[in-house]
């Protein structure tokens, strides 16, 4: 269950404020996608999901939550807090859910961008929670605390700076709460410089007095492609990033690199933007190739790579973080890691504890903005999202192969 309006990722609130300031009348549609068609839903599960989604309408920002969030994010203006105080989810108005005969969920969120932007993360977390409550019960909850402490200890020993990014893919709230508590314990034991940055989950950061972590998501850049660069998709990244800085001149300074592919991004991420932003986030493709491209890019634009940060956030594990940390050290790259599923949905089967209980592989992305189709073209083709014809059109405009599987 979702018990606080802040049980969401920080970047959703950051983007909601930006939308409020710049695009309060924009209408959007989000679409849900399950990348693993073998993990089907049932009618019983849909009914449970619907009930839990309907309960979102009961959530409201508390005075204590607001006071804390004001301290944590001073760049949020008073008018945004006034809006957030009055904000209520309207799932019966905004969400439509259908189930096919094959058990595939079809879900749309439709409405004003400012009103629908907060659905994605709680919706995805509830889809996962209900699936493992109702359909797949062959998993073990025990030992999550020990597992969390072991992973955190290894990361600290390897001098890795990291955050929890696991809200959207968590098995349930309790799993993420256990992990966040272990993060708090690590900070108390090893000190604030131990490498634990915080969590993207605002509510858990509030409960455990950790730093909320986040910046922007693909949807900010996807939205830009429809709002002010419809005829110039090649420069959508630049337009979106410059507009973002109008809202947040000194805060939320990590630029997302793969909305239309890293190659397109670096061509558009000029010297001014490279200097202005604190760093970049790598969310798909080969992370080591990205490091090499980032080093070369900084050399090309005359920026000291050691003054910037790369945040890795793509399917990370402790082992992968350790490997990347060594590679980044050799290349002089400052690295941070946002770890998701590996933290909050790493389970074994009850029937066979030597076998993993796989997490859902689910996403919910913008589909249309003011009636215009938008797409995401990651460095991994399997992560493309959007209408097939729209994807082909954008690929062609970017000079890429429009053949997709």
Image (cartoon, rainbow, N blue to C red):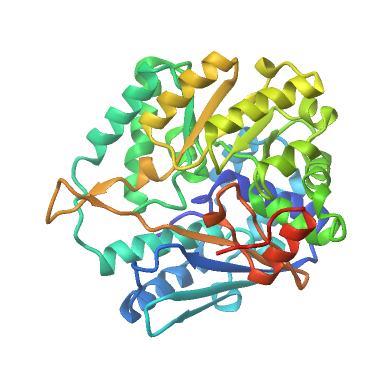
**How far from the left and from the top, in percent, is residue 246?**
84, 41
Q: Quadrant of the C terminus?
A: bottom right
Tell me which corner region of the image, top left, top right, bottom left or bottom right, holds residue 133: bottom left
Q: In the image, is 276 to the left or to the right of 210?
A: right
**Can see residue 38?**
yes
Image vertical order of residue 400 relative to residue 161, above or below: below
Q: Residue furthest bottom?
A: 101
**Can see residue 211?**
no
Image vertical order of residue 207 relative to residue 18, above or below: above
Residue at 81% across, 43% down: 238
Residue at 39% across, 51% down: 170
Depth check: give the residue in front, 225 or 130: 225
Residue at 41% across, 62% down: 126
**How far from the left and from the top, in percent, is residue 324?**
47, 26
Depth check: give the residue in front, 121 or 160: 160
**How far from the left and from the top, in percent, is residue 375?**
67, 61
Residue at 40% across, 22% down: 187
Q: In the image, is 44 to the left or to the right of 94?
A: left
Depth check: give the residue in front, 152 or 65: 152
Q: Quadrant of the N terminus?
A: bottom left
Q: In the image, is 217 to the left or to the right of 373?
A: left
Please give the count of numbered marks on the rendered protein: 0
**How far from the left and from the top, in percent, is residue 242?**
83, 41
Tell me which corner region of the image, top left, top right, bottom left or bottom right, holds residue 277: top right
Q: In the image, is 148 to the left or to the right of 339?
A: left
Image vertical order of residue 194 relative to residue 60, above or below: above
Image vertical order of residue 117 relative to residue 301, above or below: below
């Amino acid at each position: 269950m979702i018990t606080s309006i802040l049980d969401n990722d920080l970047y959703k609130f950051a983007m909601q404020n930006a939308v409020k300031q710049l695009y309060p009348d924009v209408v959007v549609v989000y679409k849900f996608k399950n990348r693993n068609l073998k993990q089907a839903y049932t009618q019983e599960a849909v009914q449970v999901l619907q009930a839990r989604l309907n309960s979102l309408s009961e959530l409201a920002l508390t005075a204590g939550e607001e006071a804390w969030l004001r301290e944590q994010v001073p760049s949020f203006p008073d008018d945004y807090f006034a809006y957030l105080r009055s904000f209520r989810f309207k799932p019966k108005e905004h969400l439509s859910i259908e189930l096919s005969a094959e058990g595939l969920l079809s879900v749309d969120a439709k409405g004003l961008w400012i009103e629908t932007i907060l659905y994605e993360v709680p919706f995805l977390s509830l889809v996962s929670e209900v699936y493992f409550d109702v359909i797949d019960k062959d998993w073990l909850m025990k030992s999550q605390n020990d597992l969390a402490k072991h992973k955190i200890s290894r990361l600290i020993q390897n001098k890795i700076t990291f955050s929890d990014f696991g809200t959207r893919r968590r098995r349930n709230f309790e799993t993420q709460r256990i992990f966040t508590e272990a993060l708090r314990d690590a900070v108390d034991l090893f000190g604030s410089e131990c490498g634990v940055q915080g969590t993207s989950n605002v509510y858990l950061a509030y409960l455990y007095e950790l730093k909320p972590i986040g910046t922007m998501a693909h949807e900010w850049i996807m939205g830009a492609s429809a709002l002010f660069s419809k005829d110039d998709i090649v420069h959508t990244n630049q337009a979106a990033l410059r507009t973002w800085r109008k809202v947040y001149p000194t805060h939320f300074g990590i630029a997302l690199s793969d909305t239309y592919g890293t190659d397109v991004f670096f061509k558009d991420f000029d010297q001014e933007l490279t200097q202005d932003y604190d760093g970049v986030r790598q969310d798909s493709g080969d992370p080591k190739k990205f490091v090499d491209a980032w080093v070369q890019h900084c050399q090309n634009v005359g920026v000291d790579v050691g003054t910037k940060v790369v945040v890795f956030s793509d399917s990370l594990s402790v082992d992968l973080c350790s490997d990347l940390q060594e590679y980044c050290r050799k290349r002089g790259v400052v690295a941070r890691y946002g770890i998701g599923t590996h933290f909050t949905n790493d389970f074994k089967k009850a029937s066979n504890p030597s076998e993993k209980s796989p997490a859902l592989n689910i996403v919910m992305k913008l589909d249309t903005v003011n009636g215009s189709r938008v797409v995401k073209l990651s460095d991994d083709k399997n992560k493309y999202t959007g209408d097939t014809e729209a994807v082909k059109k954008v690929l062609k405009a970017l000079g890429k192969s429009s053949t997709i599987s």
